[in-house]
Structure formats: C-alpha cells, structure tokens
Image: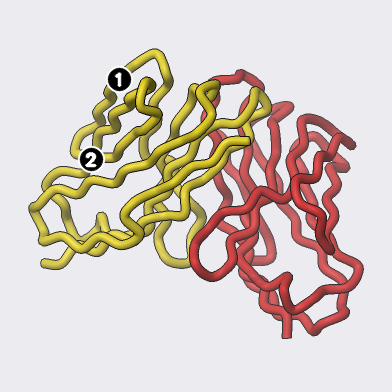
Chain colours: A yellow, B red
C-alpha cells in the first residue's frame, strides 16, 4: 500500500521568511496530492492540492511542486505570517474511492 | 455550498460505556464519507469509509463500527468503550467525481476515563 513520509516534523521560521515541507510517497499509481492545514482543536482544512498531470501549482503565498519521477512533493509558504502557525499534513490518494494516506504532519511555528 | 457537521463537539465517557458520534453533510448528494481518528501526536488514521447507504468498509480492526442509515448521515459507534478509544474523531466527505477534494468536519474530541 501507499506510504507517505513527511519532513520535518517541526519547523520554526521568522515572520516574513519562507517555509518548505517535503513529502515522499511510495505508490507510483498515486495521482492526487492534497495539503491540509490544521489549527489546534479544529478539523484539517484543504489549502492546496496538485494532480499528477502538473508539476507546480500556486495560490497566493502558497505553492506546491510535484516530482513524479522522484515521487516527492513539497509545500512552499512565502512571506510567512503568525497566522500560518499550524500543523500541516500532506497526503496521497491510494485508490479511486478517495482514500488518502497522510503524512505524520509538520508543526509550523512562525515567530514575530 | 456544502457543509459538514459533527456532534457532539466534545464527549467524556467512562470505560465500558457505549458511543455514538454523528456526522451529516449538507449541499451534496451521494458523497463518499469517511471516519478518521487522530490520536495525540497528530497522525490521521482512516477507520471507515462509505460509498453509499448501508455500504461500509473497515480499514482497521477495532472496537468501533460505522453505519450509514441515510445518504448524508454517517455514524460511528461502539458498544463498550476502551481507554484506547480516546482521540479526536474526524468525519470527511468527497463528491462522486474521482478528482473531487476531500473535506473534513470540525471533529469530536472523545475522552474515555
């Protein structure tokens, strides 16, 4: 089955700097890679996703890149702000029923 | 627009008591529905998923069961709770199209004492 590894587990950045989170997956059949942001005590919120037919996608300060050959994808947050502080999860689909395999999460702390 | 509800928001139950958590989705039809558990330490574990009324697939053998009595209602149950059942339970939905995104509900925090 699919296995998703996520690094780093914690990331501390100064406000205004960039943050990068990396994930690798094992199943070459995976073709959908979402990223979620989870604030304390809340459900995960989908912030961006990418499909295997594109290499990069951008939405304002966040972007995701995908390297299918190497089977890894990354989340990039530019000009970080304190409200970006949260746990971020990457995921990969495992089948056509929409099941997702999640990474272990990255705690991002943005310090003013 | 679509919304997903979960209740209760928090629950404290004694060991050995029954459990019923409810999830409902509004604004869509025939969604795929999912139950996840998130233990302390952040990981999301898929427990059950459903592609239609009465159709439940279990991902992990455990002390829990799920049911889908109506198209947009998903219930997580247990006859006797264990201490290890404590956690943050999340319901999610996805539209029928294969490329549709999966959206999570607000979650239920369950503490078993």
Q: Which mark is residue A24?
A: none
At x 63%, y 72%, the residue is B10
Q: Earlier in the sequence, mark 2 or mark 1?
A: 1
Seen in the picture, residue B86 relative to A27 is either above or below; the reply is below
Seen in the picture, residue A74 relative to B10 is either above or below; the reply is above
Q: Which residue is mark 2?
A: A76
Q: Quadrant of residue B77?
A: bottom right
Is B87 or A5 nearer to us in this picture?
A5
Letter of the chain that mark 1 sits on in the rendering = A
Q: Which residue is mark 1?
A: A55
Residue neighbourhood size for the residue with mark 1, other residues' Cα within 10 Å, grouped as few (<14), some (14–19), many (≥20): few
Residues at marks 2 and 1, CA–CA distance in whole angstroms = 13 Å
Q: Identify the secondary structure beneath mark 1.
A: loop
Q: Quadrant of the C terminus of chain A?
A: bottom left
Q: Quadrant of the N terminus of chain A?
A: top right
Is A53 or B20 nearer to us in this picture?
A53
Q: Position of residue A63 (x, y in %)?
A: 25, 33
At x 53%, y 29%, the residue is A27
Q: Position of residue B72 (x, y in %)?
A: 75, 38
**What residue occupies the far top of the structure in this picture?**
A53
Q: Position of residue B64 (x, y in %)?
A: 82, 60
Q: Identify the secondary structure beneath mark 2.
A: strand
Letter of the chain that mark 2 sits on in the rendering = A
């Amino acid at each position: 089955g699919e296995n998703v590894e996520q690094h780093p587990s914690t990331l501390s950045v100064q406000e205004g700097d960039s943050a990068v989170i990396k994930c690798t997956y094992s199943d070459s059949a995976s073709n959908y890679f979402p990223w979620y942001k989870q604030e304390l005590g809340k459900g995960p919120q989908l912030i961006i996703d990418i499909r295997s037919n594109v290499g990069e996608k951008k939405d304002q300060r966040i972007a995701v890149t995908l390297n299918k050959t190497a089977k890894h994808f990354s989340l990039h947050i530019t000009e970080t702000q304190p409200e970006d502080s949260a746990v971020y999860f990457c995921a990969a689909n495992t089948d056509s029923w929409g099941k997702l395999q999640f990474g272990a999460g990255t705690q991002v702390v943005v310090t003013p | 627009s679509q919304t997903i509800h979960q209740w209760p928001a928090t629950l404290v139950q004694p060991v050995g008591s029954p459990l019923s958590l409810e999830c409902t989705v509004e604004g869509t039809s025939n969604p795929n529905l999912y139950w996840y558990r998130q233990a302390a330490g952040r990981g999301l574990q898929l427990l059950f998923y459903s592609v239609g009324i009465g159709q439940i697939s279990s991902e992990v053998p455990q002390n829990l069961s799920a049911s889908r009595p109506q198209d947009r209602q998903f219930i997580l149950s247990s006859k006797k709770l264990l201490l290890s059942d404590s956690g943050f339970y999340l319901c999610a939905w996805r539209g029928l199209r294969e490329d549709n995104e999966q959206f999570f509900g607000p979650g239920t925090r369950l503490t078993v004492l």
